[in-house]
Image (cartoon, helix red, strand yellow):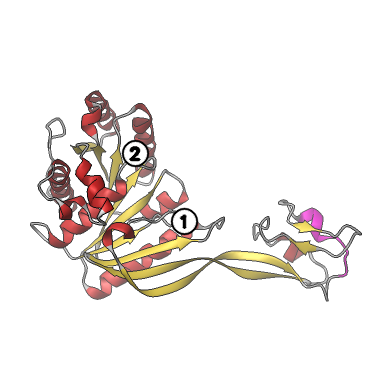
Amino acid sequence: MPRQLVILSGKGGTGKTAVAAAFAHLAHAGPSPIPAVIVDADVDAANLELVLEPRPFERHEFIGGSVARIDPERCTDCGVCEPVCRYGAILASANAGDYHVDPVACEGCASCYYQCPEQAIRMEPQLAGHWFRSQSRYGPLFHARLRPAQENSGKLVSLAKQKARMAALEEGYSLMIVDGPPGIGCPAIAAATGADLALIVGEPTVAGIYDLERALGMTAHFRVQSLVCVNKGDLYPQGISTVEDRCRAHGVEMIGWIPFDEAVTRAMVQGQPVTAWQSGSPASRALLAVWESVKGHLDGQGAIAKPSQAP
């Protein structure tokens, strides 16, 4: 069975995708390569592909739900459907009667469908997005894109992970690296579900520590083993001590911190992970140390990088 590593953050902008891209590179071309399938589970704002240069060769539709439609030839304008819609999606024309559904307001609950005495309402499947399988420089990449204003992002995340897992089983990949969405909502829960290990990327700020604790609470609730690393730790060193204290309170280990390094930005502008573009940079060395520690946990060896030391 492929092991699942999910990379999470309590908020956006912590550098989670930069860490995921570096791990994808190190799994493929690091000191101890591991065959890995990569998943970008941020279906609302996928951006991992910007640094992996994937070549898409599969594109599939994602049907995320249904929308009510009223057949005007069967509708008798009885008005039974209008009061049962809790979302105000069923509208009548100005001169009364002539009912129709606002597709933007419709939530697909089907209450009107079951109440219509003339069976004039049908539920139509709705195209909510697409999922893709691509080939990146570092292995297969499964990613998806939810259409604007569509729901069921958690369902699309689960679908992308399921397809990646099936490919890993069929093709002999031993690891799934999942770049999870930020926050603690349904998409993040779907990304963490079934994971063997979660790496939570935090920031050493007051807001960053608060959001880090929210992410730790989410993984603890779903009983996912978690580790923590701090990005840009040298910008506020006092914050690292606070993060260490909070990790101890949660029974979670902080395995290292990554310094602020302009090489990360320059590498992303070049469309590459920093570990591939400039392997000797401070951030690259720190990411390699964090990666080796994560591998140790996945292997059950419990290798820990001392968090109080500079990478």
Q: Disc 1 marks which residue?
A: 154
| Residue located 30% across and 72% down the image | 167
Question: Within 10 Å of the Cα at label 1, are there few (<14), some (14-19), or many (20+) other Cα atoms?
Answer: some
Residue type for callout 2: Leu
Q: Residue at x 16, y 34 (%)?
A: 307
Q: Is residue 180 left or right of residue 62?
A: left
The crowding category of the residue bearing disc 2, from other C-alpha atoms within 10 Å (few below 14, some 14 to 19, many at least 20), is many
Q: Secondary structure at mark 1?
A: helix
Residue 224 visible in rendering: no
Residue kind at label 1, given as amino acid type: Gly
If you read the primary sequence from the N terminus, does the residue marked by circle 1 or circle 2 appear first? Answer: 1
Give the CA distance from mark 1 to mark 2.
19 Å
- Can the viewer see residue 228 in this picture? yes
x and y percentages locating residue 123 in the rendered image = 67, 69
Q: What percent of the width, then of the height, locates residue 261?
A: 20, 40
The residue indicated by pointer 2 is: 216
Q: x and y percent of residue 101 in the render?
A: 74, 62
Check the picture and name the quadrant holding the C terminus: top left
Q: Is residue 213 above or below residue 116?
A: above
Question: Who is closer to the viewer here, 124 or 299?
Answer: 124
Q: Which residues are magenta?
A: 76-84
Q: Give 77 or 251, whichever is nearer the viewer.
A: 77
Is 249 part of what is drawn in magenta?
A: no
Q: Is residue 124 left or right of residue 194?
A: right
Specify the quadrant of the image occupied by residue 102: bottom right
Could you tell me which secondary element the residue under label 2 belongs to? helix
